[in-house]
Image: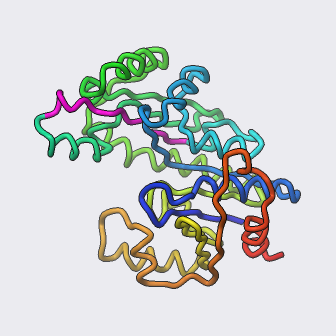
Amino acid sequence: MKILIAGLLQFDSGKTSLAAALTAQARMRGFNAVAVKPVGGHSFWSQFDTLIRSERLGKLVGEDAYILWKASGEVEPLEVISPFDVATIALDIRKIGGVSSYFKNSESIFESAVLVRLSKVLHEKIVNEHFVLTDNLQKGVATLAKRVAALAQKLKAKEISKREFAELTVRAIYSIDEILSKTISKYDIVIIESFNNAACPTPASISADKVVIVAPGLAMVFDGAKYRAAIQQLAKIKFLEIVTSEILNIISPEKIFEIKPRSKDNLYKPLDDIKRILNYLVGG
């Protein structure tokens, strides 16, 4: 069974918390379950722990992917949980031409991304490729940029331009979905977390049996076939990324659950709201 979890808001919808809690609960109940985040991104500034962890592990690893890996019982390598990861840096306003340009650059992944990992299958083994965007790194705050540069050197990251990064994000989909498809074939339940408010992270993710759109305090469940049809309908008229709010303009959820706020300490505990959602999703 494939369950896609997407966020209604661009940030802080609660996707990772729900995905981790559902995965941990499913595993407690005896399901062979795993959670994945095919496409991930994080900030080295606001999530500084990701830099420290990446230094320790010798690979770029985001916060959400690490949480899902733990919730999945560490049954797969981190690269399987998170095949594609992008880290951004806080920009130094003094190095950007004006306040408006500073905000524009800060909000663009192509202007603020500094380190990228793409994991792929090669001869039945997972191979990591790391990339560094030196031009963006030079615009970053100096107190952080120096340490990121040292990590890039440690990871033997290949230097790429912003244009090459844009091309990589398109080219990477094949490798991401190859790993995802292999993972789906191995487990009873695969919970796929999307990124930001994207309706679907990759083509292989679109064939989910159930979809949950998360907003603060709510989990809205959709039939996978109807959700897929809505995406296909939008794809005929929209060439850019399809977001979840557009899906809600076309179809309604079949069920809405209220979800409670929880601390990190309670993330993997079998609370009643998660039990109810999982029971509905798996039909028992």
Q: What stretch is highlighted in magenta?
A: 83-96
Residue ID at (55%, 69%)? 213
Q: Which of 46 and 38 is in front in this view?
A: 46
Residue ID at (87%, 59%)? 29
Quadrant occupied by the C terminus: bottom right
Q: Where is residue 24 in the image (x, y as percent from the top left)?
A: 77, 53
Verify whether residue 125 appears in magenta: no
Whether residue 202 is visible, yes or no, is no
Residue ID at (49%, 48%)? 39
Quadrant occupied by the N terminus: bottom right
Q: Position of residue 268 (x, y in %)?
A: 75, 50
Residue 273's quadrant in the figure? bottom right
Q: Where is residue 271 in the image (x, y as percent from the top left)?
A: 78, 61
**Residue pushed farthest right?**
30
Residue ID at (51%, 44%)? 175
Verify whether residue 92 appears in magenta: yes
- Does 162 appear above or below 130? below
Q: Which of 122 and 67 is in front in this view?
A: 67
- Does 62 appear above or below 29? above
Residue 73's quadrant in the figure? top right
Residue 207 placement, left or right of 98: right
Residue 80's quadrant in the figure? top right
- Does 78 appear above or below 68? above
Whether residue 237 is visible, yes or no, is yes
Q: Which colour scheme is used?
A: rainbow
Residue 154 placement, left or right of 105: right
